[in-house]
């Protein structure tokens, strides 16, 4: 089981803002390890969406933003579009497990 | 642009060894700067880091799988490989190879991914 907990699903109408939480602990996010976010479209491999808590790789729209606070992180999508319908995963490092860990994943549905 | 491509059998019998290879193009494994990882995704589930290897041959494995996993590399072919021993149905998953972690060490991420290959463990 993952040590990073995400809501199973979130939904919103086109143009709305949605947020996805990623709740960790003192051995991962709370320890200061960076959080990264991936987008996985149906039937495809994950794609890096946000790195280093809040940075966007080249080509990622600025509608996507990330933040951290304490033992949690959040991904926000503003101006939701149909093409944003996908699964989203957070990722960090856990010093207790001594390995890289992923969140449980959140399915974003555009209504 | 870095591209990764997994290859190997799609069906493995229980108790046997799962073997996959990742071919990298657009980057040289032997140049350093990045680790090269294997990650899997059980059907309809989340992602699990299996382990990674550096061009020097140094490896690091998920402690939950460490006793059953070996990752190796062939720099002459710009490939790295995964072997998972004594598989069971619980090892049925899509296996991805990925570039990363990078220079940020524990703060690093997985920058590029292969398309993934489904491996089914069944008699």
Image: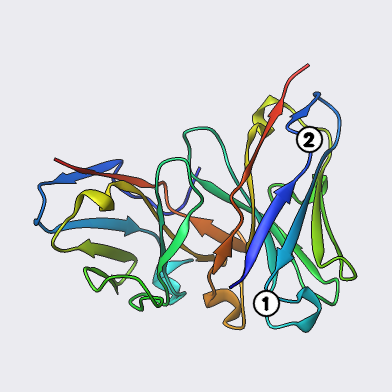
Q: Residue at x 86, y 30 (%)?
A: B16
The label on residue B63 is: none
Left or right: A32, with B33 as reference point: left
Residue A95 lies, in percent from the top left, at 57, 67
Please state the horizontal and vertical placement of residue A100, each as a whole percent of the image: 57, 62
Q: Estimate how packed mark 1 is, as few (under 14), some (14 to 19) or many (20 or more) residues with alpha carbons within 10 Å.
A: many
**Nearer to us in this view, A95 or A73:** A73
Instruction: Identify the image's colour scheme: rainbow, by chain, secondary structure or one colour.
Output: rainbow
Whether A91 is drawn above or below B68: the answer is below
Q: Earlier in the sequence, mark 2 or mark 1?
A: 2
Give A41 or B61, whichever is nearer the viewer: A41
The vertical placement of B48 against B53, above or below, is above
Task: For label 2, count other residues whose C-alpha is less than 10 Å away and answer few (under 14), some (14-19) or many (20+).
Answer: few
Q: Chain of mark 2?
A: B
Which residue is identified by label 1?
B34
Q: Which residue is mark 2?
A: B9
Q: Quadrant of residue B87?
A: top right
Instruction: Find residue A22 and report its horizontal and vertical position in percent.
Output: 33, 57
Which residue is rendered at x = 65% and y = 31% of the image?
A: B92
- In the visual, does A84 lie left or right of A2? left
Residue A11: x and y, percent?
17, 44
Asked whether, in this view, residue A19 is left or right of residue A97, the answer is left
**For the N terminus of chain B, which image quadrant?**
bottom right
SS class, disc 1? loop
Left or right: residue A8 compared with residue A11: right
Towards the viewer: B87 or A25: B87
Tell me the quadrant of the picture where the C terminus of chain B can be found. top right
CA–CA distance in space, label 2 to label 1: 27 Å
User: Which chain does the residue under circle 1 lie in?
Assistant: B
Q: Secondary structure at mark 2?
A: loop
Q: Is residue A96 visible?
A: no
- Residue at x 31% of width, y 71% of height: A70
């Amino acid at each position: 089981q993952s040590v990073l907990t995400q809501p199973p699903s979130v939904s919103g109408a086109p143009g709305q803002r949605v947020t996805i939480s990623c709740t960790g602990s003192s051995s991962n996010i709370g320890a200061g390890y960076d959080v990264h976010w991936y987008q996985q479209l149906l039937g495809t491999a994950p794609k890096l969406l946000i790195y280093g808590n809040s940075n966007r790789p080249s080509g990622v729209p600025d509608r996507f933003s990330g933040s951290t606070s304490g033992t949690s992180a959040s991904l926000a999508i503003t101006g939701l579009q149909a093409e944003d319908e996908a699964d989203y995963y957070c990722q960090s490092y856990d010093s207790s497990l001594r390995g890289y860990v992923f969140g449980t994943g959140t399915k974003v549905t555009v209504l | 642009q870095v591209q990764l491509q997994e290859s190997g059998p799609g069906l493995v019998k229980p108790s046997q060894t799962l073997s996959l290879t990742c071919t990298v193009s657009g980057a040289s494994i032997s140049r350093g700067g990045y680790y090269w990882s294997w990650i899997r995704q059980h059907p309809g589930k989340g992602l699990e880091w299996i382990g990674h290897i550096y061009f020097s041959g140094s490896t690091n494995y998920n402690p939950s799988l460490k006793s059953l996993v070996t990752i190796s590399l062939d720099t002459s072919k710009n490939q790295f490989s995964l072997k998972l021993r004594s598989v069971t149905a619980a090892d049925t998953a899509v296996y991805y190879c990925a570039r990363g972690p990078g220079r940020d060490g524990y703060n690093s991420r997985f920058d590029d991914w292969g398309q993934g290959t489904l491996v089914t463990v069944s008699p």
